[in-house]
Image: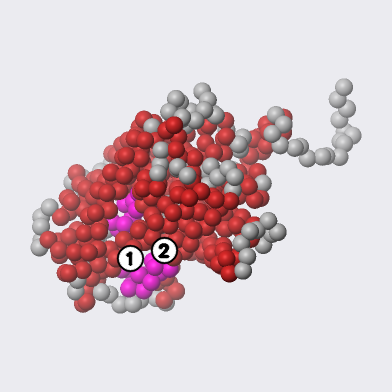
Amino acid sequence: MSTTQRTPGSRALGLPSATALVIGSVIGTGVFTMPAVLAGAGTSSLLVLAVVALGATGLGVLFGQLTRRVPNANGGLYAYARHEFGDFAGYLTGWCYWITAWAGNAAIVASWVMYVESLLGMDKPTWWMDWGIALVGLWIPAVVNLVGVRQMAWFENLTVVLKFLPLLFVGVVGWFFVSRANFGPFNASGGSLYGAIGIAAGVALFSFIGVEVAAVTAKRVRNPGRNVGRASVLGTAASAVLYVVVSAAVMGLVPHDVLVGTGTPFVPAFEAILSQAGWAGTLVATLAVVSGIGALNGWTLVTTEVSRAAADDGLFPRPFAWTDRRDTAWLGILVAAALPSLLMLWRYTSGSGLTVFTYLVNLSVVTVAIPYFFSACAQLAYLISRRRRPAGWLLIRDLIISGASVLFSLWVTAASGYAAVYQATLMVLAGLVPYAFLKARRERTGQCAAPTDLPDTRWPRAA
């Protein structure tokens, strides 16, 4: 098993495939429920969605700048933090993002399970039926990734097209059927405008996780210094336009009181366009299933690549870097499917589908905010140091992007709620235990310098 061999297929993602990977990772099953959640906050939620979209696009620009500057950008956010702040910061960033990736897969599959059950007409499934469907959703992408990155890219491109075009249909054709009377009030939360913003921010923030996947999979991208930034911005911008246009169209297609009370808002939206077509519900459920499996496919690769990059540097257990003849980190793929499988087993035996989804969404949002924050601070440290190259207005521009990204990351954390921050903090602290063993091994093998300690007189000196 080799950790260093690289085959011609290693960099199989060109700009179109890398952009499709970003779109496929950003747009999962959440877009099919997001309009109903946003409607609960009112039309002000569209402004919140636009602000979050701008923040996510700014992060895409930031990741492109970092990829061009960092010599070894494999692993993306992990590599940026390690390059600027050292091994510990790199490990902590990689650990947090790795949790985000596989816990996010669990969140996606929790929503995917509900749409599969709707498609199959399952009214009252048992917990083991839920878990069985979840295993299918997690392990099909694992098999696709095990076959090789070229096949993964083909599968990702196909699923992006299958879900992007129908959503675009709603966002374009749907506007010819919009009624102004259907839009709800600016603040429909029943409380303060700040409370309405908080309702909209949660689902909006989760919806844009994935802007960084081109950076994380830089090892797989051809000409990453050029294509990572472009793919991040293009994929995020395309997703943002689709999110805003489609959500606003659905709000205008479905009466507000109906929209806030449904978990499948695209069903009445399609019925409004297609004149009560009886197959609308089946079509929407099918689109959601396709969208979800595509997102799970991309996130399985992302989870694998971030653990492989850290393992190559000795900051994750070495088996995560084991590869086959296709340069596929096969053990990382298996773990990326096994961990959310076990997590779903635990959650399905203690809660309902919607409860499971909400818990996993909140956990993913907090743990991804930490890598975003480290990346923004890494670029900020570079810009205010003497190593920087930009000058004049270019420096001001880059400082604005980095500073805004720092503030955006902090806002993501604050908007997630106390419970999510508490649980994420426990998982972050738990990651320090394996780091202690990894650091000790790196000291023994000479991969890092050991700190100089005072002599301990309680023990006899070694011969």
Question: Which residues, given as a range, are shown in magenta?
Answer: 24-52
Mark 2 packing: few (<14 Cα in 10 Å), some, or many (20+)?
many
Q: Decide if residue 93 is on the left or right side of residue 191.
A: right
Rendering quarter of residue 337? top left
* SS assignment for the magenta stretch, majority: helix
Q: Which residue is identified by label 1?
A: 244
Q: Position of residue 385 (x, y in %)?
A: 69, 59
What colour scheme was applied to this rendering of the protein?
Answer: secondary structure
Residue shown at 18% from the left, 51% from the top: 283
**Residue type, numbered disc 2:** Ala
Which residue does the numbered mark 2 point to in the structure image?
53
Which of the marked residues, 1 or 2, is nearer the chain's N terminus? Answer: 2
Q: Is residue 110 visible?
A: no
Quadrant for the C terminus, please. top right
- Viewer-closest of 75 and 399: 399
- Residue appearing at x 35%, y 40% in the figure: 153
The percent position of residue 401, horizontal first and vertical second, equals 54, 64
Q: Residue at x 35, y 32 (%)?
A: 143
Marks counted in the figure total 2
Q: Label for residue 68?
A: none
**Is disc 2 placed on a helix, strand or loop?**
helix
**Label 1's element?**
helix
Question: Which residue is at the front of the view, 284 or 262?
Answer: 284
Amino acid type at circle 1 is Val
Tell which of 129 and 446 is nearer to you: 446
Residue 299 visible within the image: yes
Marks 1 and 2: CB-CB under 8 Å? yes
Separation of marks 1 and 2 at Cα, in angstroms: 9 Å
Residue at (17%, 50%) from the top-left corner?
A: 282
Q: Is residue 26 magenta?
A: yes
Q: Is residue 95 magenta?
A: no
Residue 88 spot, x, y in % from top left: 65, 45
